[in-house]
Image (cartoon, rainbow, N blue to C red):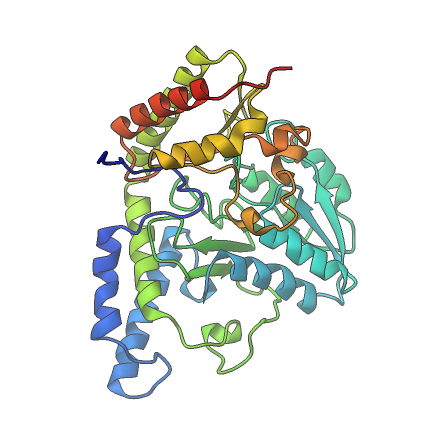
Amino acid sequence: METIRRIYLDNASTTQIDKRVVDAMMPYLSDYFGNASSLHSFGTQAKESLIGFRSAIARLINAQDDEIVFTSGGTEANNLALKGIAFANRNKGNHIIVSAIEHDCILNTCKWLETRGLFITYLPVDKGGLVDLEKLQRFINPKTILVSVMHANNEIGTVQPIEEIGKLCKDRDVYFHTDACQSFGKIPIDVIAQNISLMSLNAHKIYGPKGVGCLYVKKDTTITPLLHGGGQEFGLRSTTENIAGIAGFAKAAELCINEMETESNRLSNLRDKIIIELQKRYEGVYINGSMTHRLPNNLNFAISGLEGETIRILLMLDEKGIAVSTGSACSNNDTTKSASHVLQAIGSDQFQARGAIRVGLGRFTNEADIDYFIDTLTKTIQKLKPIFS
């Protein structure tokens, strides 16, 4: 029986947990299991650990310890940022600006906020996926309370000029939130230098556990909590803290930051190798997203004439042990199976917006994996009857 090699190239949707992260978590799953709100020694021990982990993450983004609010992940952090600012600042205004290529949890939150009387402006992007700063400047008005633009897109990997966006918002006295779940640990982030008011992070995109993340909330930001209860997390997120998960989050973040430069160079070289090989083999290959402002581990591509075969290609690759995706994993829960809103926003038609393949490289990807992927993709395409116009 043939042994199928297993190659995971979907690190934008989630990552394999690093063994070093598991080791860091284990004591908090067994020995140090106390509730951080309890007054006895078990609780104070957990509390001291929590303080240390909070400080560790804060240092990595140049934040203060009490500006880190732990959450269950990026979706909750994004919801807390948008709803929390909207509810707390109704006396100031009711207008929010978000980019047209935000993650579904931002866009669906905005749809819900519109039912609550908020006005949402969807900021367009160019063909590379970059927001239009001039239009942003024009869209901000006296009723604008928040601008939310993701640092790097989860589908096409485009990295936004968040420092410039943040300064523009700061000059207009508008809060600036960025969803940095895809970028954290891959490219530098400094909340002070980049003028960030709120920022969402999570652990499972950086080789940490699922179900844990945080929201950076700059001091003196007026925000309303979503969860009410015992007043944990400075009153902004009541629930017993997931100490083991937070331990894993802190360790995963530390490893990513320490290894960032070397790993970014390695992954961008692997990504570029795929691009070169694709361009050699297929005249009609095209890359979605900016190549000059892009995450090092992201590749989103399609082959002209084969867009309608993308799902078959994905499934045939899976049969050979290779995991890639057609876009955001969360979008696969959309029962309407609509085309990618991100690809449509950068100018793709409905057909093209259903026909891209996303490759997400990661810490455990090596050159042999890339060679196997390229060869298997070539053989897969040879088996298909192309749909050329």
State which quarter of the image contains the C terminus: top right
Residue 22: % across, % down: 24, 58
| Closer-to-camera residue (253/385) | 385
Quadrant in the picture for residue 52 = bottom left
> Is residue 362 toward the left or the right of residue 225 in the image?
left
Q: Is residue 59 left or right of residue 146?
A: left
Instruction: Pick out the residue farthest to the front.
Output: 1
Quarter holding residue 80:
bottom right
Q: Position of residue 231 (x, y in %)?
A: 49, 80
> Relative to 314, is 37 on the left or the right?
left
Q: Nearer the viewer, residue 47 or 340?
A: 340
On the question of residue 176 being in view, the answer is no
**Residue drawn at (33%, 70%), measured in percent from left and top?**
243
| Whole-percent x, y for residue 49 in the image | 29, 70
Residue at (38% x, 82% y) in the render: 37
| Rendered view: 126 above or below 183 | above
For the question of whether residue 341 can be seen, the reply is yes
Q: Residue at x 33, y 49 (%)?
A: 207
Residue 47 point in image, percent of width and height: 32, 76
Looking at the picture, does residue 360 appear above or below residue 61?
A: above
Residue 96 lies, with reference to residue 247, above or below; the image says above
